[in-house]
Amino acid sequence: MKGRLSVKNLTRYYKLRQRDSLFSRTKLLKAVDGLTFDVAPGEMLGIVGESGSGKSTTARLLLGHLSPTSGEVSFGGEKVGAVPDLAWRQMRRRMQMIYQDPLGALDPRIIVLGQLEEPLIVHFPELTRDVRRAKVRAVMGEVGLSSHHGERYPHELSGGQRQRVIIARALVMEPELLVCDEPVSALDVSVQAQVLNVFQDIRERNSFTGVFISHDLKVVRQIADRVAVMYLGRIVEIGRPDEVFHQPQHPYSRALVSAVPRAGRSGRERIILSGDPPNPVNVPAGCPFHTRCPEVRTVCRTLRPELVSDSGRAVACHLVNNPSVTREEAA
Ligand code: SF4
């Protein structure tokens, strides 16, 4: 179907060579470990998780910037990265990415207008200069940039203005799929709010399928139609933002939600997880979260929970999905 993003059993592993005094051995770093989800046409899926959970690797896999170890991504019924060169070029212009670091994503030697025109010159060579300029000016207006910003170099703009340029550069291509990787995390809170408002406005005016990645649940809640929580390369919970935010079921989601400041809530309600996330080279057996889970049970140490769906809501936890594992049972 046009505009639907489908991800099936997607993995991305890296081989790491580890050397001790006598031997060298190869280990697998499982950055993404079996993702399956769909994003409906026009829907925005938010992905949250700590750093190292595999969010950014997922973003790159979705757009074909990285090849998967196994599994597949398809958009509009076409397999990403697996079509002939010309078709892939046409497909790529329908799929755009918004990056976390706008300064790194912009060329410091070219004024903003030139950077916004560049993708049109590459992908739509048939457009005249006047038509290109008209498109660029319209998009600049849409993201709240004035024409004088077009004459400036990236270093002459504020962080919020640079991020608007990055959004404009993606929008000028009229994308059908927009993947946003931590697009506001480098901005201070007041600028974040302005850029999120820009996002909400462009979502109302443009029709595209989206994936919005952030470590900040509050940000994702504001922008997404559904939220997926990732831990060590896997989705542990997926549901509507109000469900995940108000009634998180997975113990990891509960800890993430408890860390979001809310009026009237005391600091004592915060769930503090013990330790750091495990090294993805040595993912624990059973449930990967069991080494930090405040509700761990015996079965969690040996049996990996599957992501079980219940009318659109899905959770990977024995405690939620298996009635024989009760909350009273001691680990
Ligand atoms: Fe915790 Fe067990 Fe659920 Fe994993 S499966 S989140 S260890 S209760």
Image: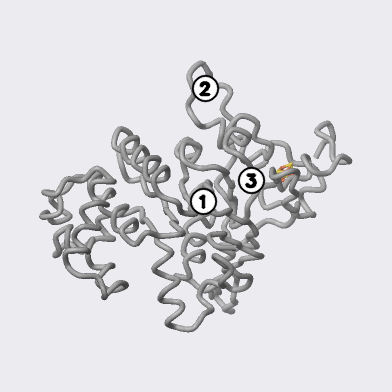
Q: Verify CB contact (< 8 Å) between mark 2 and mark 3.
A: no
Q: Is residue 314 left or right of residue 277?
A: right
- Residue at position x 55%, y 65% in the image: 76
Counting residues from the N terminus, which is met first, the one under dot 1 or under dot 3?
1
* Residue 137, position as x, y percentages in the image: 20, 53
Q: Nearer the viewer, residue 236 or 113?
A: 113
CA–CA distance in space, label 2 to label 3: 26 Å
Q: Which residue was labeled with disc 2? A: 267
Picture layout, residue 285 above or below residue 80: above
Number of residues whose C-alpha sits closer than 10 Å to that of mark 2, classed few (under 14), some (14–19) or many (20 or more):
few
Q: Which element is circle 2 on?
A: helix
- Residue at position x 63%, y 45% in the image: 238
Picture layout, residue 150 above or below residue 82: above
Q: Nearer the viewer, mark 2 or mark 1?
A: 1
CA–CA distance in space, label 1 to label 3: 18 Å
Q: Which residue was labeled with disc 1? A: 42
Picture layout, residue 33 above or below residue 78: above
- Residue at position x 25%, y 58% in the image: 135
> Which mark is drawn over residue 238?
3
Number of residues whose C-alpha sits closer than 10 Å to that of mark 1, classed few (under 14), some (14–19) or many (20 or more):
some
**Residue 105: quadrant of the picture:** bottom left
Q: Which element is circle 1 on?
A: loop
Residue type at mark 2: give it: Gly
In the image, the residue with mark 3 has its CB under 8 Å from the nearest atom of ligand 1: no
